[in-house]
Image: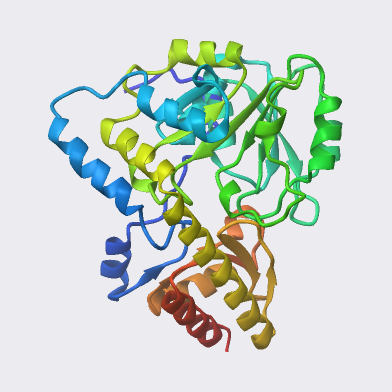
Amino acid sequence: MKLSVPDYILSIKPYTPGKPLEELEREYGIDDSIKLASNENPIGPSPLAVAAIKESTKKLNRYPDGSGHDLIRKISNHIGFSPQHIVLGNGSDEIIGMLAFAMLQPGDEVILPVPSFLMYEIMVRGAGATPVFAPLTSLSIDLEEIKKKMTSKTRMIFLCNPNNPTGTVISKKDFENFIQEMPSGVIVVVDEAYIEFVRDQNCVKSLEYLDNITPLVTLRTFSKAYGLAGLRIGYGVMPLEIADILNRIRLPFNTNSLAQAGAGAALEDKIFLEKVISLVHEGLDFLYNALDSLGINYFPTQTNFFLIDVRKDADEIYEDMLRQGVIVRSMKSYGYPNYIRINVGLHEENVRFLKALEKSLA
């Protein structure tokens, strides 16, 4: 069969997800493995969220609320913006896609920090636009470098704050200077998937600048701190004009009833969220101290994950640790051939990781 497919679609490198835990255990002949590779919440979801999900299963014969009315109302109360500014997505990935397909066309350019979240490039190419890459400086997004990349064709800029995979943040001062210099009509998208974990008081939170003259979109997710990655639910906060455009192309039932119920309950369970954040911060401090004692170089983070310089081929360390039942992420494909990335686990998982890493490096 000969298909007529646009070149810009063929230029996309498919996203390669990590293998399921069960498949890795079967492939490597291991059991009782721990996964610290996907920046997931080690505790799991809020008990209130689980209860709400169970209750909503009684109505699975009904279509979900296409407007997401109840969840949007709760998000509105949480962030202090009217519901009209909020668009729900099947994960924040879907909102990235909606922004690209609604606001871009062939010939447009979009500036992306690199390395950063891979879905930005995939969605931009999928819309026929051209990604323009701005390399990080000292693992941080370089706003000055992004400004140098701007042309009359620039239509959108993606910023991941904190950045994945480096865990670094953009300061309030740098961000304010940056958006003040934006040409009219350039949309700045700030992905704040890990914002709940930030300890740096100088980190910018883009919701504070929604009313700025620059069109600004903030992305948030329930996948990380709220532990609902399996439900795929996120949201965007944006100017009314952009929200109206996205709602024109949004699928009528893009977020399912279980996800809406779980996210709404999770948002109200502040005690559980504080527990998750405390566990992550305590885990980071424990891992930092242990790595210092072992003389292993790492890069402090504002997220629930961080980079470690293993000073060896990262793929080899990944394979060796996998055989010990500890799953980490090699950063070789991101341009860091000697770095691995791990997320904080439960305390016993963190201890097991350290033992496996020390053995692999020996």
Report whether residue 93 is seen: no
Q: Residue 336, how many percent across, how many down?
A: 66, 60
Residue 159 left/right relative to 80: right
On screen, residue 277 above or below 238: below
Report how many numbered discs are placed on residues in the image. 0
The type of colouring in the image is rainbow
Position of 34 with respect to 278 (left or right) is: left
**Quarter the C terminus occupies:** bottom right
Left-right relation of 283 to 28:
right
Q: Position of residue 116 (x, y in %)?
A: 63, 46
* Rendered residue at 29%/76% (across/down): 30
> Residue 272 is drawn in which quadrant?
bottom left
Residue 199 visible? The answer is yes
Please give the name of the residue rendered at 44% of the width and 57% of the height, measured from the top-left corner: 41
Quadrant of the rendering where the N terminus is positioned: top left
Is 293 rendered above or below residue 105?
below
Instruction: Give above or below for 168 relative to 355.
Output: above
Q: Residue at x 64, y 87 (%)?
A: 294
User: Residue at the location (65% across, 57% down)?
Assistant: 302
Seen in the image, is 14 located left or right of residue 181?
left
Q: Nearer the viewer, residue 34 or 86?
A: 86
Measured as percent of width and height from the top left, residue 280 is found at 53, 64
Out of 122 and 183, give the one closest to the viewer.
183
Q: Quadrant of residue 180?
A: top right
Asked if residue 224 is positioned above or below residue 110 in the image, the reply reads below
